[in-house]
Amino acid sequence: MTTRDADRLRALKRAHATSPSGPTPRVEDYIEVVYELILEKGYARIIDIGAHLHVSSPTATKMVQRMAEEGLVVYERYRGIALTDAGTELAKRLRERHGILTSFLRLLGVDEATAHKATEGIEHHLDAQTLARVADLVAYAQAHPEWWAKLEKR
């Protein structure tokens, strides 16, 4: 094994290490869906959450109960789900992150539907510093379309 291979192996190990704090990618997915449902319909129900995430109602219920224990939602059986202040704050950050990444992919010429789908795969794995750099690039490209047009022609 070369030094380069060993470095790559260590980098992979660090990249796949789980973060001891913060929500899991699955919790983030649920929070995003709850928030978007509330924005669209005014409420979020287990059945709607399950339909959007392609999981059964019992699976959605278990996750919502877990999020209630974590203080992200208020859940009462047979009633809608509401976000707590902490849940709402997280949802807003997740929505912003999603928007930044979708804008970045659209800037690269990816169609809207594909950009949203790809964002779902990328968004949980970017650290705050990387996301901030992507946001800076998107903002600059949007503010300077002539600069971006030159880059696209290369």
Image (tube, grey):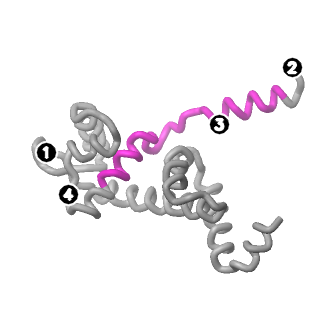
Q: Secondary structure at mark 2?
A: loop
Q: Amino acid at mark 4?
A: Tyr
Q: Amino acid at mark 2?
A: Met
Q: Which mark is residue 1?
A: 2
Q: Are marks 2 and 1 in contact (CB under 8 Å)?
A: no
The residue lying furthest to the left in this view is 78
Q: Secondary structure at mark 1?
A: loop
Residue that numbered label 3 is attached to:
15
Question: Mark 4 to mark 2: distance in Å?
Answer: 56 Å
* Mark nearer the N terminus (2 vs 3): 2
Q: Secondary structure at mark 4?
A: loop
Measuring from the top left, give residue 70's x and y in whole percent.
31, 43
Q: Amino acid at mark 1?
A: Glu
Q: Within 10 Å of the Cα at label 4, are there few (<14), some (14-19), or many (20+) other Cα atoms?
A: some
Question: Mark 4 to mark 1: distance in Å?
Answer: 13 Å
* Mark nearer the N terminus (4 vs 3): 3
Viewport quadrant of the N terminus: top right
